[in-house]
Image (cartoon, helix red, strand yellow):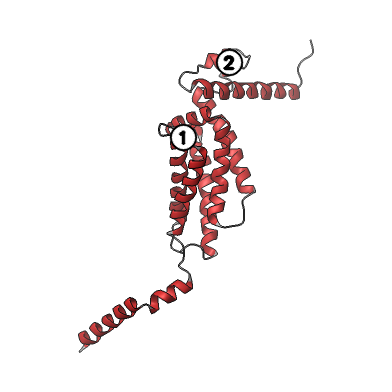
Amino acid sequence: MMNETPGRIERSKRDKLERIKRAARKLFGRKGFEATTTREIAAAADIGAGTLFLYAGTKEDLLVLIFREEVGRVVHDAFATMPSRPLLDQVLHLFGSMIALHERDRGLARVFVRELPFVEDRRHGVAELMASMLAGIANLIEQAKLRGDLRAEVPAARLAHNLFGLYFSHLQRWLGGDPITSRQRDESLRAALKLQLDGLRNAPAKILAIEKSSPVRRAASTGAARRTRRGGR
């Protein structure tokens, strides 16, 4: 019998890993994370139970592998095709791409939402992916500040977390116990993101000029000036 070449061995490994991921993705989405066993995954992938652990030590490892591969690819592609402006359309482009992924398998999306916030990240690296995505959003925010669309003092990293939090809360509601339709989810998410960003915009020069010339503002300024003069006597 001829020995397998290194290239054939690598192809065999890749093929097994792909079968494992397909089997796990299907079972997690259909049965849930807790109800799925490693033996079921191995059987569906047509490998031995012991072979599975050569590729993923635990179910958690396998779930994170799937998440990082699928969501990581979507996030990368979303930033690569990012519209130039405005900021609202940019963040909707990113979050909409992630939602489109989850719409293809809501069962698996529920598993991601329920399980991944509690993984031991020092070993799995979910935070690394999240940090990279949030840094990308923060960079979009910094660009918006340079264009004058947002106030210069807005903390970009904090706003990036806030925007993601709005997305995640809508994703949870859509998947969870207080379900909304896809259209309601999208409309509500846009409105929530717009409200957040509108409150941080630079006021147009015309509005500032009107405020400065308003009777209430002039009266307040005149009163302050009189009090200052009296105090100086």
Pick out the residue farthest to the right: 2
Q: At which x and y percent is residue 168?
A: 46, 41
Query: Quick one: label 2 or label 1, which is nearer the N terminus?
Result: 2
Which residue corresponds to mark 2?
Answer: 42
In the rendered structure, the answer to whether residue 223 lies left or right of residue 114 reads: left
Residue 215: quarter of image: bottom left
Q: Residues within 10 Å of mark 1 (few under 14, many from 20)?
A: few
Which residue corresponds to mark 1?
Answer: 121
Q: Nearer the viewer, mark 2 or mark 1?
A: 2
Q: Residues within 10 Å of mark 2 (few under 14, many from 20)?
A: many
* Residue 164 visible, this angle: no
Please, what is the three-letter code of the amino acid marked with disc 2?
A: Ala
Please, what is the three-letter code of the amino acid marked with disc 1?
A: Asp
Pick out the residue farthest to the top: 1
* Closer to the camera in the image, 225 or 210: 210
* Residue 142 visible, this angle: yes
Position of residue 64 relative to residue 206, above or below, is above
In the rendered structure, the answer to whether residue 136 lies left or right of residue 170 reads: right
Q: What is the spatial separation of the Cα atoms under label 2 and label 1, in whole angstroms?
A: 25 Å
* Closer to the camera in the image, 178 or 158: 178
Q: Quadrant of the N terminus?
A: top right
* Closer to the camera in the image, 165 or 126: 165
Q: Quadrant of the C terminus?
A: bottom left
Q: At which x and y percent is residue 191?
A: 46, 50
Residue 12: quarter of image: top right
Helix, strand or loop under label 2: helix
Q: At which x and y percent is residue 32?
A: 48, 22
Position of residue 26 relative to residue 74, above or below, is above
For image coordinates 62% across by 17% down, the residue present is 45
Residue 72: quarter of image: top right
Q: Given contact means CB atoms under 8 Å apart, are the residues at marks 2 and 1 in contact?
A: no
